[in-house]
Amino acid sequence: MRLTSIAQAAFLLTVLTLPVAASAQQAATGSAPAQDVSARVEQRLTKMHDALGITSAQEPLWGQYAQVTRSNANDMSRSFNQRRTALASMSAPDNFQNMAATAAQHAQNVQRLAASFGQLYAAMSPSQRKIADEVVRTRGERPKQ
């Protein structure tokens, strides 16, 4: 895989996971129920799967990517919930350390997504890659043709 392809895949993953992390944070702060996070993750995965036209040959790679996405959303939801619970008793230094740990966890999750999606991206046709690139530019929604 070329460096530009890796960079594009990493960017796509970052854009696609930020709404997941935000949903997880909303669930942790009480503004969105945890089941809504899972439903949103599934909705985004379904939209992306359909937009990319994943083939039966690509399905195993898609399944790996989807599982990493779900696992990351669950991890971040748990992390935000733990933070919300502990926040009232945290000192300022503890709060900063907790934010740093959460950011580090998110970075690790994005690395896992980048690796998983990178394998899928490598197996995509040029037209699928073009769609993937468009999906990134439009924040998850395939542009109207």
Image (spheres, grey):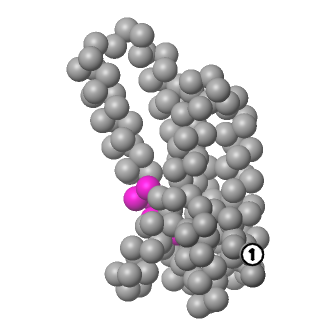
Residue 115 picture quarter: bottom left
Residue 79 in the image, given as x and y percentages of width and height = 47, 31
The residue sitting at 53% across, 53% down in the picture is 17
Q: Residue furthest top?
A: 89
135 and 6: which is toward the camera: 135
Q: Is residue 114 magenta?
A: yes
Q: Is residue 64 visible?
A: no
Snapshot quadrant of residue 52 = bottom right
Q: Circle 1 is placed at which residue position?
A: 144
Majority SS type along the magenta span: helix
Is residue 108 visible to us here?
yes
Number of numbered discs overlaid on the protein picture: 1
Q: Residue furthest bottom?
A: 126
Q: Secondary structure at mark 1?
A: loop
Q: Dot 1: within a 10 Å radius of its alpha carbon, few (fewer than 14), some, or many (20 or more) residues?
A: few
Q: Residue at x 52, y 50 (%)?
A: 18
Q: Quadrant of the C terminus?
A: bottom right
Using the image, determine if residue 58 lies above or below residue 108.
Answer: below
Q: Is residue 92 above or below residue 117?
A: above
Residue 130 left/right relative to 90 = right
- Tell me the amino acid under the disc marked 1: Lys
Q: In x, y percent, where is residue 139?
A: 59, 61
Describe residue 87's horizontal placement relative to residue 36 as left or right: left
**Residue 102: image x %, image y %?**
38, 36
Residue 94, percent from left and from top: 28, 20
**Which residue: 69% across, 82% down?**
57
In the rendered structure, which segment of residues is drawn in magenta? Answer: 110-117
Indicate the quadrant where residue 124 lies.
bottom right
Query: Residue drawn at (41%, 84%), measured in percent from left and top?
Result: 1
Residue lying at the far front of the rendered structure: 144
Above or below residue 33? Residue 92 is above
Magenta segment: does it hold 93? no
